[in-house]
Image: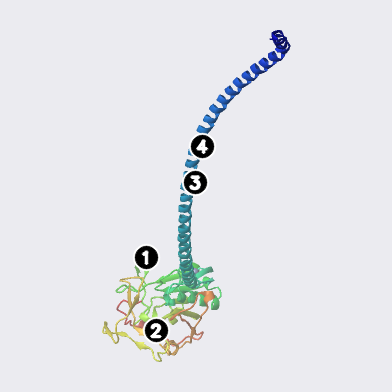
Amino acid sequence: MPYPKIFKDIALATPVIGEIVGERDGLRDKYGSLLTEYDLLSHRLAQVSLECDSLSSGMAAVISDRDRINHEHAAILADRDRLQKELAALAADLELVRHDLELASQERDHLKQLVDYHDSRKNIGYCHCCRQESVFQMRGEWLRDLYVCLNCSSIPRQRHLQYVLDSYFRNWEEMDVHESSPSNNFVSRYCKNYTSSQYFQGSEAGSYVDGIRSENLESLSFPDNSFDLFITQDVFEHIFNPERAAREIMRVLRPGGAHVFTAPKHKGLPISITRARLVHSRIEYLMEAVYHGNPIGDGKALVTWDYGDDFQSLMNRWTGCSTTNYITRDSALGIDGEFIDVFVTRKNFSIPPTRSKKSLKSTQGIKTV
Ligand SMILES: [Zn+2]
């Protein structure tokens, strides 16, 4: 047995064996570390698997949420569509309301036009009663009483009388003026030598009642030729004997003087009519009794005469003097309406035939003027 040879070979191979053993040990270590790494990776894998499960679970929740959100989104879209339909319906309603509003606006414009129309029943002009630019307002169809100066409340016949005075009687404010039964102060406010009187039934002419001179137009207590102007406003239709009154006024006027007056003259009435007269100091009513306002007494004045087309002729016959009938229609003067005529009876420079005062026995015993 070549034993030694084996030992020799072994001795020769020992370093190799050592290397192999070393390599084997190295591989063992590597194997051990690979096992450790494997364990770690296995552990990690288990963790990742858990995480994966967890993520899957989360994903399911997210998908569930997504589905829920999708469902809610669909519901919201449905709501949106419903709201859009409602909005369209509301828009249609709004259009109807707009249409109604437009109609209401047109109605309002129409009413405004009506108001403007009534406002147009105002006009600016010159008022001879308050002697300034003023606004005249038609407060109704009956202009005689309802066409009013907003500054002085005068009515057309009053403005007309002042207009005639201002236009045809130069410096009349300086004249001796008497007014019978004044119901306003439009004459007196401008006149320096102004006197007035009222008729007080039962009071002596020339006496005073509560500081007011009592006079009976049919039997005046003034001397002849006392005044330049004699004014009566809506008085003559209340006198039982206008002939006597007209002659008395002429008597107390100076030659060239004038009776300036208003009285209702009825269109289309050819002959003046006596409505009531005195018979033995009692009133005889020939027609239905009609009354006008009266500034004194019980506020009522009986209408005794309706004057017609013959009025100036009557005055001329009664006084021997001519009577001019002024007819004016001028909104710039606030003069318009019915029964607003102004009359002027001028006393002749040659004295008209008048009865002496003593021969005048008044028939006026009942309250007139
Ligand atoms: Zn006025």
Residue under numbered circle 4:
55
Estimate the spatial distance between the alpha carbons at disc 4 and disc 2, rounded to whole Å: 141 Å
Amino acid at circle 4: Leu
Image coordinates of residue 175 in percent, x first then y, are 51, 73
Measured as percent of width and height from the top left, residue 299 is found at 33, 72
Can you say which quadrant of the picture contains the N terminus? top right
Disc 3 element: helix
Spatial CA distance of label 3 from label 1 is: 109 Å
N-terminal-most mark, 2 or 3: 3
- Which circle marks residue 155 in the picture? none
Q: Position of 19 compared to 159: left or right?
A: right
Query: Element at badge 4?
Result: helix
The residue labelled by disc 1 is 211
Between the C-alphas of marks 1 and 2, the distance is: 29 Å
Q: Amino acid at mark 2?
A: Ser
Task: Please state, as top left, top right, bottom left or bottom right, where the C terminus lies in the image.
Answer: bottom left
- Indicate how the structure is coloured in the image: rainbow
| Nearest to the observer: residue 277 or residue 128 | 128
In the rendered image, which residue does mark 2 sit on? Answer: 356
Verify CB contact (< 8 Å) between mark 3 and mark 4: no
Q: For numbered disc 1, what is the local secondary structure?
A: loop
With respect to residue 210, does 353 lie above or below? below
Which residue is identified by label 3? 66
